[in-house]
């Protein structure tokens, strides 16, 4: 059966875009969201953030705006004042959610943090704000379970985030969003970046461009 595993860190606006497209247009395809630490991937692979190269950073802003217009992706205006910002706490909360609540609700929490930063303009460096995002996503009771896991099993949470990051690297990742995609026959392939979402669609048998999106617009 076709499936998608998406390795993601909420610091990446392209990760948010990729997740939005998958959630909006790939609803029938099993999806596993895996929170990773992008800084760890960068360090391990010798990669550099786009903004470390000024001209590349400027281009990324233009490209991000174009991508969101192309696919009708709602997103905040501009980048956060402090960018890139530390996301280690937010990523650990997401990992703790997967441990405490399972994959399905873990996916919900990952999506909530992506939206919080890139749509709702929430400062996710703040412990208080992370807690609020969590409560909004899964309710007070489940949020309590996640926070308990985060505080009482800190080492296990840290280790799981490390394992997630290492798994992404082992599969070939040098950045995010990083897709590991299986087709209906179980053949696996890897795809980096939201600009190759058409290849993801082809592998899992989803029509692309999606209904309502003009073909000429999708190919801009």
Image: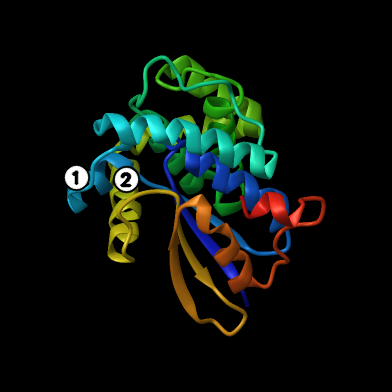
Write the residue at 54% across / 28% down.
118
Badge nearest the viewer, 1 or 2: 1
Alpha carbon separation for disc pair 1 and 2: 22 Å
For disc 2, the neighbor class at 10 Å (few under 14, some 14 to 19, many from 20) is some
Which numbered disc covers residue 43?
1
Residues at circles 1 and 2 in contact by the CB criterion of under 8 Å: no
| Quadrant assignment for the N terminus | bottom right
Please provide percent x and percent y for residue 38: 32, 42
Pick whichever of labels 1 and 2 is earlier in the sequence.
1
Whether 15 is drawn above or below 216: the answer is above
Q: Quadrant of residue 191?
A: bottom left
Task: Look at the picture and state if 130 lies above or below 56.
Answer: above
Disc number for residue 138: none
Whether residue 121 is situated above or below residue 35 in the rendered picture: above
Task: Residue at 59% x, 23% y: name it.
Answer: 76
Which residue bears the numbered disc 2?
156
39 or 218: nearer the eye?
218
Residue 56, by quadrant, is top left
Q: Looking at this view, is 202 or 218 the one in front?
A: 218
């Amino acid at each position: 059966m076709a499936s998608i595993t998406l390795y993601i860190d909420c610091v990446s606006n392209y990760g948010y875009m990729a997740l939005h497209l998958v959630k909006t247009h790939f609803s029938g395809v099993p999806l596993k969201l895996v929170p990773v630490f992008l800084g760890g991937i960068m360090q391990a692979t010798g990669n550099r953030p786009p903004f470390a190269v000024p001209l590349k950073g400027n281009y990324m802003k233009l490209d991000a705006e174009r991508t969101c217009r192309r696919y009708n992706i709602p997103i905040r205006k501009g980048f956060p004042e402090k960018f890139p910002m530390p996301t280690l706490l937010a990523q650990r909360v997401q990992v703790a959610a997967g441990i405490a609540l399972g994959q399905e609700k873990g996916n919900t929490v990952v999506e909530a943090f992506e939206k919080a930063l890139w749509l709702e303009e929430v400062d996710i460096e703040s412990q208080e704000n992370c807690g609020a995002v969590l409560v909004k996503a899964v309710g007070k009771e489940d949020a309590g379970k996640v926070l308990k896991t985060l505080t009482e099993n800190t080492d296990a949470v840290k280790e799981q985030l490390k394992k997630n990051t290492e798994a992404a690297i082992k599969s070939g990742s040098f950045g995010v969003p990083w897709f590991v995609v299986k087709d209906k026959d179980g053949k696996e392939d890897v795809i980096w970046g939201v600009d190759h979402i058409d290849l993801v669609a082809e592998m899992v048998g989803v029509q692309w461009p999606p209904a309502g999106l003009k073909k000429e617009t999708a190919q801009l």
